[in-house]
Amino acid sequence: MVQYKSRETVLGELQTFLKAFNRQIDTGQNSLTKDFVLLPQAVGGSLVFEQIETVNNQFILSQQDAAELNLEGTTYKLERSAGTFAVVTAIFYTATAPTAAIFIPAGTQIQTTGTSFVSPVVFETVADYSVALSATASFFSYDRSRYEFPVLSTAMNTGSDSNVGTGTIISMASSIAQISGVTNLTASSGGSDIESDEDFRSRIQSKKTGRDLNTVNGLTAYVESAGFIDAHTVRVEDVDAERATGVDVFIIDTYIAAATQTFTYQTHIPRYYFENPPVVTVSSVESSISGIVSSSNYDVNIDNTTPLRRSAHAQDYIEIRAAASLTPGTTFDVTYTYRADIAQLQSTFELDDNNVLTADPLVKHAYPLSFIINATLTLKTNADGPTTRNRVRNALIQFLATYRLGQDIQKSDIIIVLQEGYGDFAVDSVDAVIINSYYLRDEFGVSYLPIDETISVSAKQYVISGTATIN
């Protein structure tokens, strides 16, 4: 939570300001307003009055109860974040071979074991589930010697308490034909509590005191203050814009996280979308019945549409080919990596609403623009060759690290660094500098035309030197 000066401190500063200008000004309680209105020199204290108003607003906010906070939030188009329902794939099972089709109706209630202190967590199936008798054999689990039927279920109440561990769902509210029990082989997830008064009050306060976050510089500064190396905000009117509305915020992100997502295979569902875009790679696909799915039996589609590519809104998905021979209702796990920094920052924008959402920011991964530098130097007679070349190479790397997104590189600057960058003046002359034969490639393999003296870098690119060879 932002800390503010006390009302007494701010008023004291205001009085000091006025007395410093003219000791004859009456700063008493009964005449302060009169002097501020009549004396033009007091206009300089307007910023202090803004602080007084802020202090008053924050004091009022701190005293508001839940209902008053909800009303206050509407003034700034904010709503308290509602709790969410946990979801889980429940496994209905039987050790006896079915003699008829399996049918589990929507709304079937299952639950954990309660105690005298804790109520059971109740889930219910979200849709009718059926398996033809001829297909039931494929649902037999040799590991557990029973027939297992996976059914998507959701908690009946919101809250983090509905995130329960593996094997904790153990009972059904009513019997189901040919089903002897229920369990969960994976933990439930996604349940969250209603936003607390403290957290909601903090969001309202941030909205009230937001400054300049709908400007390019303000938005960029906000992203950089979150700990990112660099950021570049692009408006719709800019040449690098990728959307017709809103602003794109390109960042240099470094955190690649791993995730495993469970899907239920159905023949009528051609695409299974990842919940954590943008996706980098898929490492494995494993069926709950048949095990590892060969990479030749699925396709990973990374969204390369201009408006959404490399963003947390990218529509990345996987397609399972018919050759995988998965049975409808079978679950399969997809293990993949994704750009966690992109997803987290986008989530921060959309949840925190720090005067940003009116700009409709979309966070995107800025890709590295790599190139090779080959330089030939003439060293002074007393210079140690290997040591000097290594120092020059390090100086060049440090120089390139100072470049920001969208900042062009001049060949002349590279030459200056090569000759003088380390400061010991051991280089007599720079005889040649070749930059990757003047051809650059980005992560999509797009070739660029030869350059003359400038490496042009767009707002969605940042420079890295793949190799620096100093001869």
Image (cartoon, rainbow, N blue to C red):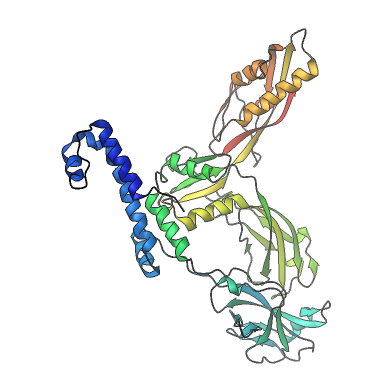
Horizontal side, residue 48 vs residue 261: left or right: left
From the viewer's perspective, is residue 286 above or below residue 359?
below
Residue at the spot x=38%, y=50% of the render? 209
From the viewer's perspective, is residue 77 above or below residue 309?
below
Q: Quadrant of residue 318?
A: bottom right
Residue found farthest to the top: 381
Q: Is residue 220 or residue 458 the one in the foreground?
A: 220
From the viewer's perspective, is residue 438 above or below residue 32?
above
Q: Is residue 45 or residue 372 the one in the foreground?
A: 45
Q: Is residue 158 or residue 93 the one in the foreground?
A: 158
Residue 458 visible in this rendered orientation of the protein: yes
Horizontal side, residue 258 vs residue 9: left or right: right
The image shows residue 53 at horizontal and vertical percentages of: 31, 50
Q: Quadrant of residue 128?
A: bottom right
For the image, the number of numbered tags is 0
The image shows residue 141 at horizontal and vertical percentages of: 80, 78
Horizontal side, residue 348 vs residue 175: left or right: left
The image shows residue 275 at horizontal and vertical percentages of: 61, 61
Residue at the spot x=71%, y=19% of the render? 375
Residue at the spot x=74%, y=71% of the render? 326
Looking at the rendered image, the quarter that the C terminus falls into is: top right
Residue 471 visible in this rendered orientation of the protein: no
